[in-house]
């Protein structure tokens, strides 16, 4: 049995695919997809699919909108600009307005620091322009 078979049997992979498709409409084709690319660390995306998208984003208890707010705050504090670009778009998909995203950035400046907030603002501008 492969790692993928174990993930499928727990339902986390399927739940993760659904949560990812809901958050990023039109990005992933329907049906079962293999996210491995044959390069070093190729299983990282599959691990994220089950552990983050399947086990966390697919949980009940917080709405996708609320999960986006929490995720943005954490990513700003971590200075994770690449992830922020994706999650700003996910936030909009989950119902956040650009004004609300700006408020998250402003609020984070008091806790994560002005440089982190400035980097987040720049990532938001890049992700949401156009």
Image: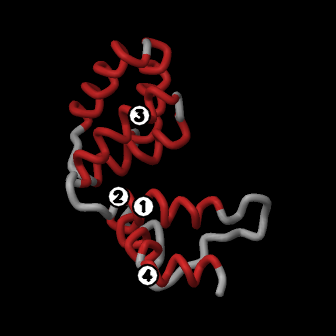
The residue located at (44%, 41%) in the rendering is 127
Contact flag, marks 1 and 3 (Cβ < 8 Å): no
- In this picture, is 7 found above or below 67? below
Counting labels gives 4
Quadrant the C terminus occupies: top left
Q: Badge 1: few (under 14), some or many (20 or more) residues near its Cα, within 10 Å?
A: many
Badge 4 or badge 3: first in the primary sequence: 4
Q: CA distance from mark 3 to mark 2?
A: 15 Å
The residue located at (79%, 59%) in the rendering is 40
Colour mapping used in the image: secondary structure
Nearer the observer: mark 4 or 1; the answer is 1
* Rendered image: mark on residue 63: none
Q: CA distance from mark 1 to mark 3?
A: 16 Å
Q: Which of 40 and 50 lies nearest the eye of the viewer?
A: 50
Badge 2 or badge 4: first in the primary sequence: 4
Residue marked by disc 3: 74
Where disc 1 sits, the SS reads helix
The residue located at (42%, 20%) in the rendering is 117
Residue 70, percent from left and from top? 31, 39
Where disc 2 sits, the SS reads helix
Residue marked by disc 2: 57
Nearer the observer: mark 4 or 3; the answer is 3
* Rendered image: mark on residue 53: 1
Contact flag, marks 4 and 1 (Cβ < 8 Å): no
Q: CA distance from mark 4 to mark 3?
A: 30 Å
Residue marked by disc 4: 30
């Amino acid at each position: 049995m492969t790692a993928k078979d174990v993930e499928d049997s727990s339902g986390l992979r399927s739940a993760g695919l659904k949560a990812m498709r809901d958050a990023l409409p039109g990005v992933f084709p329907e049906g079962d997809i293999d996210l491995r690319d044959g390069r070093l660390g190729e299983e990282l995306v599959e691990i994220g699919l089950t552990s983050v998208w399947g086990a966390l984003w697919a949980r009940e208890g917080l709405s996708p909108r609320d999960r986006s707010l929490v995720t943005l705050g954490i990513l700003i504090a971590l200075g994770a600009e690449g992830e922020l670009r994706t999650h700003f778009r996910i936030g909009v998909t989950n119902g956040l307005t650009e004004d609300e995203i700006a408020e998250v950035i402003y609020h984070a400046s008091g806790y994560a620091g002005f440089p982190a907030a400035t980097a987040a603002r720049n990532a938001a501008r890049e992700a949401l322009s156009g």
